[in-house]
Amino acid sequence: MAKPTTRFLCAECGAAYPKWQGRCDSCGAWNTLSEEAVPPRAPGKAGQVAGGRRVAFVPLKGETAPPPRIATGIAEFDRVLGGGFVPGSVVLVGGDPGIGKSTLMLQAAARVAERRRTFYVSGEEAVEQVRLRALRLGLQDAPLGLAAATSLRDIAASLEAEADAALVVMDSIQTVFLDSLDSTPGTVSQVRACAAELSRLAKSRGFALVLIGHVTKEGTLAGPRVLEHMVDATLYFEGDRGHQFRILRAVKNRFGATDEIGVFEMTERGLVEVPNPSALFLAERRGNISGSAVFAGIEGTRPVLVEVQALLSPSSGGSPRRQVVGWDSGRLAMLLAVLETRCGLSLGQNDVYLNIAGGLRVNEPAADLAVAAALVSAAADRPTDAGAVYFGEVGLSGEVRQVAQADARLREAAKLGFSTAILPRRVARGRSAPPAAPEGLRLTEIGHLADLVASLAAAPGRAKGGAA
């Protein structure tokens, strides 16, 4: 019986099937299988590899110092990378269409090109289109090598001829194709093969490589999951296109901290870094409105203060709505259950809307206390203390638990002029005493969510709607 010459690969997870089927059994996605040619098998018997050469093993302690990082000069970008690009590394940058990925990388490449040889290869735009963007950003005089190409053979041959290349940006990896594969650009086999070849070239030649990637409607990077394992760092560029703030987040980094963020503002002249995002996120806050609380969070190594907004309205019938922007909807449901069961606060007949102002996505459980304060404030129609910040994790029994890096959160709150911090009860760990409060900041420690409800219920009320 002749062996099959084609197979069907899932575009989401890369699983292979001998024939087409509507649903992928591996990841459960529908209509993601595409037909591709089976690659030729290497000669030799099954389970046996012959013809290799001996690999030399070296001591773990190297004899030479690691090469210095390539800093872009954009502080927020370098913070996320861990200090700049590492020579020979491969960085994958993903984000929604139109969010500003190409703009950010063109700005970073132009900065590096002022000191090191840098190339920008576009597979989605013509050279003149990239030049128009550079003119709008004021980068037209940057000594940046620019090309428009999609053939992997042409790109590899061009980079092989450049011995002094320090940084190469490929925009985007889904447009590159290898003509020896019988499949269209962007398919699983093409993305995997092209990324592997470009990564091999970057590590052998010693230049840093940036691959810009598309994302799916679920917000994950398009193509095979193995693509994220092949690269050294994976960065996501997040934000609402109708909002001026953009967040660059590291979800994988072999040469730096993960969950580090960089904050940018989109302007007519491109992306401008925001050195103090806390002040920017709180710039439009009105402290005399109910349903608002300030959360002292940690993003990577940086403390960030953001406003949590909650709105309760009577349900019009049927199941009450639970609408969340910037937080976990499942955690909101848990917190509502705790407030109703442990604190006697009736919220089941209300539509609940929760928003993290500024477009930031908060993932840490330390935001529980701030969200609870915003919900209780909205339910009682009483504003929280305008000079207070909140942080703490809430358990199912209503207890408020300690969170990490409380010192950094308190210092950031004191630096921005807040007078009170509501936090979990601090206990000594080992022989060390609880951290002292920064000067000018008063600490209010609570052990149960009922204490928070009682304190907000006893706060002075206001007229509905509030004053400006």
Image (cartoon, helix red, strand yellow):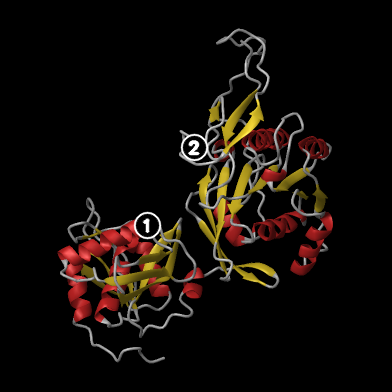
| Relative horizontal placement of residue 333, taking residue 343 as reference (left or right) | right
Disc 1: which residue: 364
The residue sitting at 32% across, 68% down in the picture is 370
Residue 211, relative to residue 154: is it above or below?
A: below
| Mark number, residue 112 | none
Mark 1 and mark 2: span between their CA atoms? 34 Å
- Tell which circle, 1 or 2, labels the residue nearer the N-terminal end: 2
Residue 151, picture quadrant: top right
The residue lying toward the viewer, choosing from 402 and 191, is 191
Residue 36 rendering spot, x and y as whole percentages: 65, 30
Residue 221, relative to residue 329: is it above or below?
A: above
The residue sitting at 33% across, 56% down in the picture is 330
* Amino acid on which disc 2 is placed: Arg
Residue 215, relative to residue 205: is it above or below?
A: below
| Relative horizontal placement of residue 218, taking residue 131 as reference (left or right) | left
| Image quarter hosting the N terminus | top right
Q: Secondary structure at mark 2?
A: loop
* Amino acid on which disc 1 is placed: Glu
The residue sitting at 45% across, 71% down in the picture is 357
Residue closest to the far top: 45
The residue sitting at 74% across, 34% down in the picture is 178
| Relative horizontal placement of residue 345, taking residue 212 as reference (left or right) | left
Residue 102 rendering spot, x and y as whole percentages: 68, 57
The residue lying toward the viewer, choosing from 374 and 80, is 374
Q: Mark 1: few, some, or many residues within 10 Å (few <14, many ≥20)?
A: some
Disc 2: which residue: 23
Residue 126, picture quadrant: bottom right
Residue 63 rendering spot, x and y as whole percentages: 61, 30
Residue 81 rendering spot, x and y as whole percentages: 57, 51
